[in-house]
Amino acid sequence: MMQDTSEHIKYAEIARALKAARQRKGMSQQALGERVGLPQSHISKIESGTVDVKLSSLIELARALEMEFVLLPRQLLGVVESLQRGASESELYTRLEIETTDALKKLGDTVSQLRRRYERSDPDGADELKALDSAAHELARQFVPQQYAQEVRHILTTLNNPLRALRNLQELESDIGHAANYRTNLNEQFAAIRPLRLRLQQIRNAAAHGAHERASPQMPAYRLDEEEDNA
Amino acid sequence: MMQDTSEHIKYAEIARALKAARQRKGMSQQALGERVGLPQSHISKIESGTVDVKLSSLIELARALEMEFVLLPRQLLGVVESLQRGASESELYTRLEIETTDALKKLGDTVSQLRRRYERSDPDGADELKALDSAAHELARQFVPQQYAQEVRHILTTLNNPLRALRNLQELESDIGHAANYRTNLNEQFAAIRPLRLRLQQIRNAAAHGAHERASPQMPAYRLDEEEDNA
DNA sequence: AAGAAATATATGCTTAGACATATATTTCGA
DNA sequence: TCGAAATATATGTCTAAGCATATATTTCTT
């Protein structure tokens, strides 16, 4: 139902882009068709622009090719095309991503020091801190995707209290008179840390496999875990 | 033909984006329909996501709304969404820029410590170090533009030797037997530092006024200054 | 409150996408 | 050159998008 040639050009451009993405992934039309539930012959038609494909099919094809369709204001088209052509296109980051990533590095360093303190007195706790340190550094290394940045900042803020408490407890460690409270308090702090660490690991995995893989941003898993732990 | 909920979400997102774009333009469904040759009732179905619109229709609707429908690598989504939310192009950074900026921060910290050591024994030298510290931190604050990143890294490398020498000299300061050599050596190190500091200041100024203002990266000014100092 | 404008929903017809299956043609690798 | 793999094209069936038209419902403005 297209009316003029610029729309025909756009249509052909999308067909070409899909084909190029499939070839970059080293997939055959057969393999792609199996992935999205379309026959190879239909993939061929789509890539050659001889079928006016529906949006639902486009979305699935894009997903299978680790791409996304986006509706953009026309003014941004030049910038976005530059980003796509740029050698370091996947290495561009927003200020929020950078700052969140810096904060994660600091967290990792802080937790690394704290872990050394607990290495002998509480090996299980030290393991928990080691896992948190790894999650923080790994996520920092690949940068926090924009849509997780606010959530990661919230996690970092939430971690302040238990980590401070752990530092204080470590200083009390030699004070024998507090032994019972000490152990209980220690367990509480690690119980608070664990779901946050699990969530950072989830985000790190989502970042590694493409930022939109997990579709539900409402109740983060660490809150579900908190509820489980309270049971 | 969509298979899982993340694709339904994407589908609804595009429907919402079309409606939002129409409303931003102050158009009715009737007017948009007339523009693209579709009945108002069909526009309503498209915007509510109750029809699986074909690519040709989507392209025409996007055009009429001054939008483009674009296929992007998933990694670019965060950046593109930032652009759409109004983050300016200049808030996006490459990995190289980020790493160079981190290195500048470290330089600034190192130089700040060194400056304290020379504060009483060599106030002129301390002033030079203070200026270098300021240049490094100011440039780090606004991020090193891509086209200066290699040069800045070179400057940082070149600064290693004179700064190390200054650290060593400071430790020798109380050794009276080396007084003549000490003063000569001190002056040599500051003479080596000064043009590099001047160049960092130039780059900081260029960065402040827009990364592309100065177009000539061939003979950095600090090499010109070195030749002047030898005269 | 009332009327106009805008949007959502219904009905019906035509055409084409989705999908299955088969086969022709081209490309690739040994 | 030859066979396998990949892609393009053909045929057929079913379902739904595109489109026309009408009407119900909601929203907006006075």
Image (tube, coloured by chain):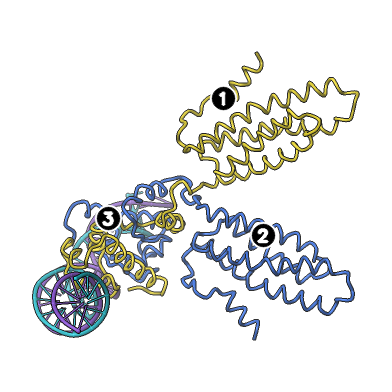
Chain colours: A blue, B yellow, C purple, D cyan
Residue A183 image point, x, y percent: 80, 77
How far is mark 1 from mark 2, CA to CA? Answer: 40 Å
Indicate the amino acid at tag 2. Leu
> Depth check: A96 or B27 in front?
B27
Residue depicted at 68% across the width and 32% down the height: B159
Residue B221 — which label? Answer: 1
Disc 3 chain ID: B
Residue A93 — which label? Answer: none
> Depth check: B119 or A104 in front?
B119
Residue A107 — which label? Answer: 2
How far is mark 2 from mark 3, CA to CA? Answer: 44 Å
Residue A189 image point, x, y percent: 72, 73
Disc 2 chain ID: A
**Residue with the most extreme top position:** B231
> Depth check: B145 or A3 in front?
B145
Indicate the amino acid at tag 1. Ala
Indicate the amino acid at tag 3. Glu
Disc 1 chain ID: B
Q: Quadrant of the N terminus of chain B?
A: bottom left
Residue A97 image point, x, y percent: 53, 56
Q: Residues within 10 Å of mark 2 (few under 14, many from 20)?
A: many
Q: Is residue B57 left or right of residue B224?
A: left
How far is mark 1 from mark 3, CA to CA? Answer: 47 Å
Residue A107 image point, x, y percent: 67, 60
Residue depicted at 21% across the width and 66% down the height: B28
Residue A22: quadrant of the picture: bottom left
Q: Which residue is mark 3?
A: B66
